[in-house]
Image (tube, helix red, strand yellow):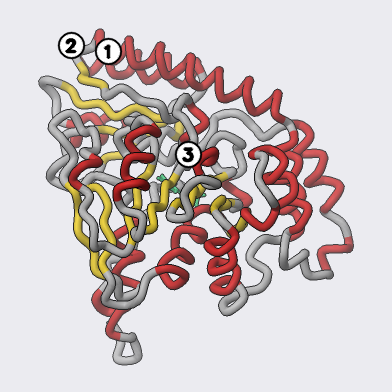
Amino acid sequence: MNRFWSKIISGISPYVPGEQPRDKKYIKLNTNENPYPPSPKVLEAIRDETSADVRLYPDPDAIALKDAIARFYQVDRSEVFVGNGSDEVLAFCFPAFFNPGDTVSFPDVTYSFFPVYSRLFGVEYETVRVAGDFSIPFDDFRSGVRGILVPNPNAPTGIAADTGEIEKLLKKLPDTLVIVDEAYVDFGACSCVPLVHKYDNLLVVQTFSKSRSLAGLRVGFAIGNKGLTEALERVKNSFNSYTIDRVAQKAAEAAIEDREYFLRTAARIMDTREYTAKELERLGFVVLPSKANFLFASHKNISAEELFIRLRQEGILVRHFKDPRIDNWLRITIGTDDDMTLLIEKLKAMMV
Ligand SMILES: Cc1ncc(COP(=O)(O)O)c(C=O)c1O
């Protein structure tokens, strides 16, 4: 605390990102990064763009990147907004669509940035309690809230909802903006992007950080009707005109154009996930059905906190949350086959 801090900043508990360790080399299964490098075409694009031209500002409208995303999803460029990671896109949604004092709603077990953004922008929030099996009871979202935020698949559970459930919600609450955070959708879930032309109360947010291995370059995007993307542009242009640098724009463009590499690496991660889930179950873990690049697992006899600490000592980082509803669960990012084999070996040794 300091006497110059604003009231909001004095009262907020900022989001705590997963650890990026500096003390030694770990197998990092704690921040849902992709274990594979980006496509060789991305690396080539980065090399080509790394020139004296970095003295010039990037395209503030990121037109070439928006066009590449629009082509991939068969939408119009005007329906695409790009930001510095999907975190920034989600943050911009607050001043774009919600007034201070409005109420938004999201599941009680979900991406922990949502309550932080709500507080930062003076927006009230209420939560819908996820069921015992951690599924989201979509019928429990009520009318009268200004916005609903749902990750699909949800984080940190990895559970995917049927897009039919989301469509029912869009129909039931036409005056509520539904923001579907599809950070992990490419690992086996169904996207709501095809619904954006049908529902003007739908905004879909995605990222290049997970399925396209670009977490380090910070590129995310939203797809929705023109009225929604225009509001996001207004926020961006009232804040920072150049949110995505030249290298990141080119790299993301090359990433979305290399469909074959993207499909191949995502399929590999899904295969590794299924193998890991089976092995964990064999060791006595309850594992939620995941359509993401991570698993959420709880052991019958050994606490998640103990496993977290012991794995860390063994050089493997996973994520453990203190929230009492999920404090006996570990979120384990899917790494390479070798990473996961080692994880299983280490866990097996802890079971005896
Ligand atoms: C549910 C969810 N949404 C959004 C993000 C943000 O991703 P990024 O800002 O890297 O695009 C994450 C990152 O872990 C996430 O788990």
Q: Which residue is mark 1?
A: 348
- Say above or below: 150 vs 136: below
Question: Could you tell me which residue is drawn at 47 percent across and 42 percent down?
Answer: 183
Which image quadrant for residue 60?
bottom right
On the image, the x and y values in percent for residue 121 come to 35, 74
Given the current orientation, which residue lies at the most extreme top position? 282
Mark 3 Cα shell of 10 Å, populated few (<14), some (14-19), many (≥20):
many
Residue type marked 3: Cys
Q: Which secondary structure lies at badge 2? A: loop
Please name the residue shown 47% across and 24% down the image.
188
Q: Earlier in the sequence, mark 2 or mark 3?
A: 3
Name the front one of labels 2 and 3.
Answer: 3
* Residue 293 relative to residue 46: left or right: left
Distance of mark 2 from mark 3, alpha carbons?
45 Å
Q: Are marks 2 and 1 in contact (CB under 8 Å)?
A: yes
Q: Nearer the viewer, residue 155 or 147?
A: 147
> Label 3 belongs to which residue?
192
Residue identifier under label 2: 352
The span from disc 3 to disc 1 (Cα, nearest Å) is 39 Å
